[in-house]
């Protein structure tokens, strides 16, 4: 073989685990290998789901507290059983970090007979905006009163 580079065959990487069982990563029939690889992924997904659920509960509690405080300050009744997540997305904060941006809808009443809507937006766990919808009366920007 004049001047031709040495030809090497691709090697099948095979190894043994602690029990001396054969582990062949390219063999789809090797259940032991696939189980070992999927368990950490499942655990990570489960942990992420728990974190998201707990973070969402804390964010909702923050939103409810802000709504209660604002409605009490304005002399209107906050209907706390009406708080519901209406939008969830990723947004950057002032430092450029990605955070969850949640918008909740809620209802309030002035007289007990008519209901009005409001929204509260959180970036992370911080109140970004609280708005009360009322066609015949404009409330001052409610988020400014939370400080």
Image: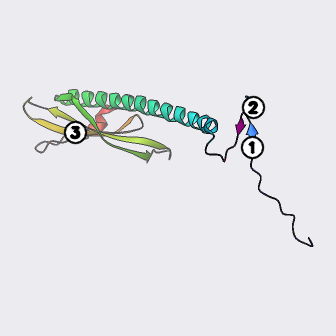
Question: Which of marks 3 and 2 precedes in the sequence?
Answer: 2
Q: Residue furthest front?
A: 29
Q: Are marks 2 and 3 in contact (CB under 8 Å)?
A: no
Q: Residue at x 55, y 37 (%)?
A: 41
Decide whether residue 25 is among the magenta residues.
yes
Decide whether residue 115 is among the magenta residues.
no
Question: Is disc 3 placed on a helix, strand or loop?
Answer: strand
91 sits left or right of 147 in the view: right
**How much space separates mark 3 and mark 1, taking CA atoms?**
62 Å
Tell me where residue 126 appears, x and y as whole percent: 39, 35
113 sits left or right of 21 in the view: left
Q: Residue at x 26, y 27 (%)?
A: 69
Q: Residue at x 75, y 46 (%)?
A: 13
* 69 relative to 27, above or below: above
* 73 relative to 92, above or below: above
Question: Which of marks 1 and 3 precedes in the sequence?
Answer: 1
Give the image quarter of residue 36: top right
Q: Residues within 10 Å of mark 2 (few under 14, many from 20)?
A: few
74 sits left or right of 20 in the view: left
Magenta stretch bounds: 21-26
Q: Residues within 10 Å of mark 3 (few under 14, many from 20)?
A: some
Give the residue pinned by disc 3.
118
Tell me where residue 32 appears, x and y as whole percent: 63, 35
Give the residue pinned by disc 2.
20
Label number found at residue 14: 1
Question: Is disc 1 placed on a helix, strand or loop?
Answer: loop
26 or 129, nearer to the observer: 26
* 108 relative to 6, above or below: above
92 or 45, nearer to the observer: 45
Question: Is disc 2 placed on a helix, strand or loop?
Answer: loop
């Amino acid at each position: 073989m004049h001047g031709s580079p040495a030809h090497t065959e691709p090697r099948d990487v095979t190894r043994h685990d602690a029990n001396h069982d054969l582990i062949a990563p390219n063999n789809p029939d090797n259940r032991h290998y696939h189980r070992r690889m999927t368990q950490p992924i499942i655990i990570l997904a489960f942990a992420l789901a728990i974190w998201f659920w707990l973070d969402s509960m804390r964010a909702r509690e923050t939103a409810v507290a802000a709504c209660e405080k604002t409605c009490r300050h304005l002399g209107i009744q906050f209907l706390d059983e009406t708080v519901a997540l209406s939008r969830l997305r990723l947004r950057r904060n002032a430092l450029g970090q990605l955070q969850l941006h949640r918008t909740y809808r809620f209802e309030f009443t002035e007289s007990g007979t008519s209901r009005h809507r409001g929204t509260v937006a959180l970036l992370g766990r911080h109140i970004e905006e609280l708005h009360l919808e009322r066609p015949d009366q404009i409330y001052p920007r409610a988020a400014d009163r939370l400080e």
